[in-house]
Amino acid sequence: MGRKYGYAPLSIEDNPRKKGTHLHEQAAEDEQNDRIVNERMPMCVGICVLLAIVYVLSRTGDGAAMPLRPDPNQGNVRAGSSMPPVVTDATPVETATPCPTMTCPECKQFPPAQPAPATSCEGLVDPATIDMGVLRAKALDSTPPHIIECSAASDGESQEACHLPAETRYAALGQKGATLWMTGCSGAGKTTIATALEDRLVKEYGKHVYRLDGDNLRTGLNRDLSFSEADRAESVRRTGEIATLFADSGVITLVGLISPYRGDRDAVRKRHEEQGIPFYEIFLDVPVDELKKRDPKGQYARVESGELKHFTCIDDPYEEPLKPEITLKTHELAIEESADRLFRMLEADGILEGAPKLTPPGLPNPDGDVVVDLHVPDNLKAARMAEAETLPKVLITDIDLNWLQVIGEGWASPLKGFMREGTLLETLHFNSILVDPFNVTGNAGRHERRTNFNDFTEHQPHQRVSMSVPITLSCTSFTKDAIEGSSKNAVALVTQMGQTVAILRDPEVYDNRKEEIVTRMFGAIDMDHPYIKTIYSGGDYLIGGEVELLDRIRYNDGLDKWRKTANELMAEFQEKGADTVYAFQTRNPTHAGHAYLMRSAGEDLKTKGFKKPVLWLSPLGGWTKSDDVPLDVRVKQHEEVLLAGTSHPGGLDPDSTVMAIWPSPMVYAGPTEVQFHAKSRRSAGASYFVVGRDPAGMKGSSIAVAHKDDDLYDGDHGRYVLQNSPGIGGMKMLSFVKVMYDIQDNVMKVPDESRMDDFISISGSKMRLLARNGAVPCSPTDIPNDLVEANCVPSGFMVPKGWEGVVDYYRNVDAAERWVPWSRPVIEAPACKDTVPSGKLGSGSFALKHKHYDSFWHDIPRRPTGEADSIINLVVEIPMYMTAKMEVQKGMEGNVITQDTNKDGSPRYYTYGTPFFNYGLIPQTWEDPSLISPEGNGGDNDPLDVMEVGSTPLKMGSINPCKVLGSLELIDEGETDHKIICIALSDPDSSKINSMADLDSVKPGTTERLIDWLKRYKTSDGKPENNLARDIPTTVAEAVEIIEETHGRWRALCGRDGTTETLKGTDGFWLTSPGCKEL
């Protein structure tokens, strides 16, 4: 062989680093030592085997064996080594000394060996005494891990510092690595269950999975190992190391080994824990008697016959796990049930997702793997509010406010603002968006950047997230010009009632392509569809950008306790111990049929292995069409359902049910919309969504191009599309089944085909008719087939108090102000302390009167006492930023301030934008319609209007001394409508502004914006532009002259100038106040 194979050390002598030795030199030396061990160990083992052969031959053959001795040229094993001397060269021995006779316990069947010739035993090794397990253990103990290739990591630590970060790897793969270590006696089902789980994960979910077991390990990696205790331990160690590497690479690794010794398994667990890799010990606990019955390989029979000895779990020990992650009694479970439990465990722990687990076990990550909560922290609120005062104002409607809540509270995750143009395009064309939350492809935050149609990414993000409904914010040219003319890179979002609720950053303004949005979103042409009308009524532009909510959105309608953010709802599910959540959306009162379906769904989930499925009763809270059941009616009925509990067939168990309002508007877009319904529930913790026939659908109107007065969408399409929609991820559907009322059992359930005469159908339309008729409970023992004729409702159909509430609504459906149709803010009027409000702001019942004056119009003087003619009293009707069209009512007693109405009786709002001025009137003035201007236009029959251009909102009903700056003459539908421009004396800029020229000097562009507003404020309602008599404001003197003239006409109106006849157009005016005509 030569000297190359002359001597191989079995361990490297410790070599402390000498002073002055460079680290890289020491590392090179260590590497050389390791290389020698790895190269020569197989040769050492071979020599040991050769010695054993020689020894056996020497004891069994007729000839004398040639004695061996150490090669003096190779030296001895190092001092202090526990290793026996190894003979590596064969040379005749001249002086022989008899060796002791040696016996082999495994060879008892051979006849006694003949005495061996005399040999020299000095320095020789008896191979029978070599224990490879001991050698292996000592070698492992003396060679701690050396990390040569990874200089950034410390000895013995993870090499991740020199590898792709696990978070990035897992995000790219769409899963995490983990090891499932299945242990148990032979025949317990380790391979069978691992195969079933592997099949499911790979085929159904596309996951990377690999199975390690005795079959594929002992054909290669472990083929040199026997079944001795030491070799079994080594088999477990090697397999554990391989599993650690596989799992670290992102593979879900399924190990099926008997691995009988607890210490060996614990060592593997420790190795995984050191590397931060999930490790699950799965104990297949099957009685031995059951294993003997199964005996798939016939081994237990061989044990029984005595043919096989030292068989684990029979005459060799098996140490059961003390705290396994899961115990499977496979003799009590079907293969699919066992595999399903393992699958649920992986799913609950987020192993099947690449992103870090952000939610409690059993609850899914929000879409896009990011928790969205856009509320400004308390410590920053004051600063953000101060900032918002300086920003351009963007009007949001009450529907926009619903959408803002959806965004800000995380219901549309990962969306963080109103959609930018690129996001909108993806939503319209794909019903989903591409995201890269971990910047795997360099596309992180792509939806928070302005759309660039000239710069496309080289690599598409891997992750697709469901996003089927456009969430956009429209605006008019008035708002667009304000944004583009501002030096700020943010805008303040202001409600119709003038409340600043959010800041939108980095606004992106783009065309509102309404037809494209409608056709893509609805797939139907029906201009009388309620949400299609809403889209077409919006401005010609859209604003995209990320939002910050300045405070929690509250509606103050008595229902806020049921409004919870997505994160709060997650916490409540966790508090109830939910291991899965299923959501049931309601737009109607919940009857016993619904309750039956919800309870049945929960029971079905338990059969899938869930211990505590929790129902989310999820009434839709945002905008709905006018004939839908009001939100408060539904919520209060649901409260009774929960109070009834399981004592009534229409009740629900409050211990396993959470009720929470879902804040989104309803858009009635059928299959497109239902995808958003499901996705949004997932973002708050639901893994299952109960979906029925024609979800989110409605009937077409009488002017629909197709399906007039019929369902716009096929009833089965919604469920089909939802099940196959892109980006839906792991969200699963639970379908409705048809239920009917069993008149024998007095419950709603799936009908029994063998006795269909005992079942009656109670449709939604029939329920509404019965409620309108005030139907009372039927006799439990005599339920008629024709409920309408009998005017009764079965006692088991709905919880009694819940039914009473439904009846109350349908019998008083026209009392509109009694109900809360959908989530709209109820706020106190921003009124002066000297006024008395009544009714609800935003409704026809609201009225504001003054405490000290009988009439806002007649009793307050037109100017403060002692002031110059250019100082007038401004009575504020509409505070700055408010769009509710408030005005003094000429025909109502006290000339109170109320909200103007549209032709259909609904409250009127400005839609052109957020007013940047306070609006009101000058008391004791009147624009007489009989007074014709040179252009042929009469007065508008109202008090003289005022636009106050200060910097802060003034209180509704307040009386404010105001400096006249000029006026503009609006021609509105053939009437002259003068607008006096003034600035309140209380405004900080009042001393600097004395004319319209001063106004534009101090506040550039104000006159231009006033003119734009007056000309175009009605265009957003589909009306033509107004005209001005001239585009140049009058002087202060000219404006004062107009004031005096209209004051004179008011005096005539009140008969203060001696006029006695009723003037044209004044029939119905309330004039009987002290300042006008006392009775």
Image (spheres, rainbow, N blue to C red):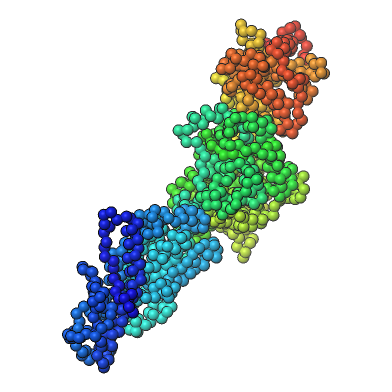
Nearest the viewer among 537 and 159 is: 159
Is residue 655 something one can see in this rendering?
no
Q: Position of residue 908 (x, y in %)?
A: 68, 30
Dividing the image into 4 quarters, which one contains the N terminus? bottom left
| Residue name at image x 69 percent, y 54 percent | 714
Classify the position of the C terminus by image quarter: top right
Image point 46% across, 55% down: which residue?
Answer: 164
Task: Kindly indicate the quadrant of the structure image that contains residue 1032.
Answer: top right
Q: Which residue is drawn at 27% across and 82% down?
A: 90
**Can you say whether 979 is above or below 579 in the image?**
above
Q: Residue furthest bottom?
A: 62
Between 469 and 777, the residue placed more toward the observer is: 469
Residue 472 in view: yes
**In the image, is 96 to the left or to the right of 244?**
left
Residue 953, horizontal then vertical, whole percent:
58, 23
Q: Position of residue 831 (x, y in %)?
A: 57, 22
Q: Where is residue 453 in the image (x, y as percent from the top left)?
A: 65, 45
In the displayed structure, 605 sits above or below 83; it is above
Q: Nearer the viewer, residue 644 or 111?
A: 111
Number of labels in the image equals: 0
595 and 321: which one is in front? 321
Residue at left offset 52%, top offset 54% = 687
